[in-house]
Image: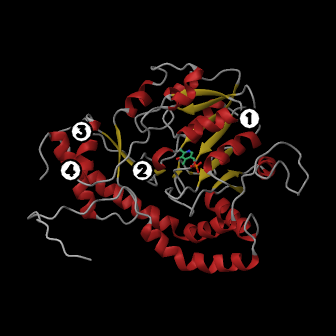
Amino acid sequence: MTETLTTTSPVPAPEPVPFLDLGAQTAEVEADVRERWDEILRTSGFVLGPDVERFEREFAAYCQARHAVGVGNGTDALEIGLRAAGISRGDEVIVPANTFFATAEAVLRCGALLVPADVDDDFLLDPEDVAGRLSARTRAVIGVHLYGQMAPVAQLRELVGPDVLVVEDAAQAQGASRDGLRSGGAGDVAATSFYPGKNLGAFGDAGAVMTSSDDVAERARRLRNHGGVNRYEHLEVGANSRLDSLQAAVLSAKLTRLDAWNLRRSEAAARYGALLAEAFRDVPEVVAPRELPGAAHVWHLYVVRVPDRPAASAALTAAGIGHGIHYPAPVHLLPATAHLGFRPGTAPRAEAHADQILSLPMFPGITAAQQERVVATLRDSVTGRGPR
Ligand SMILES: *Cc1c(COP(=O)(O)O)cnc(C)c1O
């Protein structure tokens, strides 16, 4: 390698801050995972099998549900959970307008009708708005535990009564609780995702359906495996969406550490809260997220609202700070749902949030120095000062 002379700036550029850093978590479980993987490689039991059954038992207990059924990913978990609970063509399903598209996609893949509803200023389904969308054909309402905080499942239950299913999209909230209810164990049926970036993430795609109904669990086991539990006995048209043993072994190893990781997220969220309160004391347009009374938030994402998002985003990019927008458009205003004919104004709060929300770096192990730099950069962009 030849040596080159470069002009160096007097002040070294600050280290970039990643949006998400999974490296430390991977290192922590690596030895445990390798040990299980060696055994799986020896036995060639790659799909379902003892490691999957073990993780299903562990995760059901963690969610305080009777059953967990491992599937291929979170989107399939939603679709299989809805179908297993009896949702089919023509049923109306109420979904918060601001969620990852998969929530709406699963409803539409069941042949059901998508009914978007508005959210409150904590980004969660607003029971009052849901009340106005109920009809004789409403069969389910999906509470999405967005960003790591649980939707008001108890209030939704009370609102819709016993004949409408309360479904949880718990993909972003493994370990969260609210009003004494546990994420994944609070509704009639719940779905979660173990996509690598979730609080509990596999080394690839994976998901699970949770329920305390023996019948719904049995049907979900069938639907994930070509409509039958026993080979070549196909009782209905299902899917191929099973959990791999290799992923189940990763998930078991990570589950024992999840509470500790969630605690570190919660400490980081508290630090952001203090830094933002100080930096934006006189700027009420910058709104920090909050943990609701009676809730344990697991901070999958740390989402602030800012008045001029393009400026904030440009400043963070210039400073090498990772960030995201979850999500840039509500589900009823996406090209994929254009044929359904929803108009702007359908869910005004969710639509307004879509232009203001900004997800800051958040992961267990983010340092105080990194968080201080994120908030200082945001402060400079909002107050119009140049970088320090
Ligand atoms: C990640 C996610 C899903 C989908 O999970 P996949 O495993 O990516 O299919 C569904 N809903 C929400 C809210 C999510 O965050």
Pointer 1 local density, CA inside 10 Å: few below 14, some 14–19, many at least 20: many
Residue 276 in picture, x, y percent from top left: 25, 49
Disc 2 residue type (three-letter) = Leu
Question: What label does residue 377 carry, if any?
Answer: 4
Q: Is residue 245 left or right of residue 270?
A: right
Secondary structure at badge 4 equals helix
Which of pointers 1 and 3 lies earlier in the amino acid sequence? 1
In this view of the protein, which residue sits in the foreground, 87 or 73? 73
Q: Of circles 4 and 3, which is in front?
A: 3
Mark 3 sits on what residue?
311
Pointer 4 local density, CA inside 10 Å: few below 14, some 14–19, many at least 20: many
Which of pointers 1 and 2 lies earlier in the amino acid sequence? 1
Q: Residue furthest right?
A: 233
Disc 4 residue type (three-letter) = Thr
Disc 1 residue type (three-letter) = Ile
Is the C-beta separation of discs 1 and 3 under 8 Å?
Answer: no
Q: Of circles 3 and 2, which is in front?
A: 3
Secondary structure at badge 1 equals loop
Secondary structure at badge 2 equals loop
Mark 1 sits on what residue?
87
Residue, x 48% and y 38% (percent of image)?
124
Question: What label does residue 338 carry, if any?
Answer: none
Label 3 – label 2 distance at C-alpha: 21 Å
Location of residue 113 with respect to 74 vertically, above or below: above
Question: What label does residue 301 carry, if any?
Answer: 2
Secondary structure at badge 3 equals helix
In this view of the protein, which residue sits in the foreground, 15 or 154? 15
